[in-house]
Image (cartoon, rainbow, N blue to C red):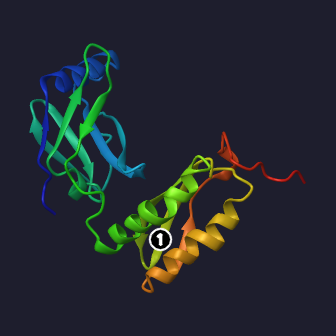
Amino acid sequence: MKEPRLSATPAAIKRIESVRASQKQPDAGLRIAITGRANGAFVYDMGLVAPGDERPGDMVVETLPGIPIHVPLASAPYLDGIELDADLPFGAVRVNNPNALWLDPLAEAVQRLLDEEINPSVASHGGHIDLLDVSDAVAFIHMGGGCQGCGMAEVTLGQGVRTAILQSFPEIREVRDTTDHAQGANPYYQAAKK
């Protein structure tokens, strides 16, 4: 697999070095993983990796001076060309990513269906539905905002989202909701008390 091209501003490098110093890990690398997509953007997980704590399946990119960057293989194509930046003195490191959200045309088409036909309607209830992945003919989605924990989430999924995806994409045989609805903080409709 091709190693992603990465760059960082001086502010990002200074911030990473500051975090390594405060954590007493001056030789630690930085791990960057894409954990999903939400609201039309990538969701990242970043953390320090001490020497010897490397994860199997990660590649190590040595493009930043003295800061090895650990990248999971699944994230690598979506991290090619990124720039790390930060607001000093205490701003978090952020990722400026020029890549499209999906390299797979089927996933891109499902995302477009969600963005153009489904999310405008659930947005009126304060919700949003994000595509996490399409794998082995299964579309994995996550319901957020007013949809998470909503008493009508199963109806929205069963009669709206699932039906729209399965009718539009015959190559998808299942739509799986990955949402932990028990964690919903502000559901649009409260679930009925049992």
- Comparing 50 with 69, the one in front is 69
For residue 36, side relative to residue 105 (left or right): right
Question: On the rendered image, what quadrant is the N terminus found in?
Answer: bottom left
Estimate the x, y position of residue 175 in percent, counting from the top left. Answer: 54, 73
Outermost residue to the bottom: 170
Q: Residue at x 22, y 45 (%)?
A: 97
For residue 53, side relative to residue 10 (left or right): right
Element type where label 1 sits in the image = strand
- Comparing 14 with 118, the one in front is 118
Estimate the x, y position of residue 55 in percent, counting from the top left. Answer: 33, 49
- Comparing 187 with 52, the one in front is 187
Relative height, residue 62 to residue 13 (above, below): below
Estimate the x, y position of residue 142 in percent, counting from the top left. Answer: 53, 57
Residue that numbered label 1 is attached to: 139
Q: Is residue 132 shown to the viewer in this render?
A: no
Amino acid type of the residue tagged 1 in the rendering = Ala
Relative height, residue 10 to residue 114 (above, below): above
For residue 32, side relative to residue 136 (left or right): left
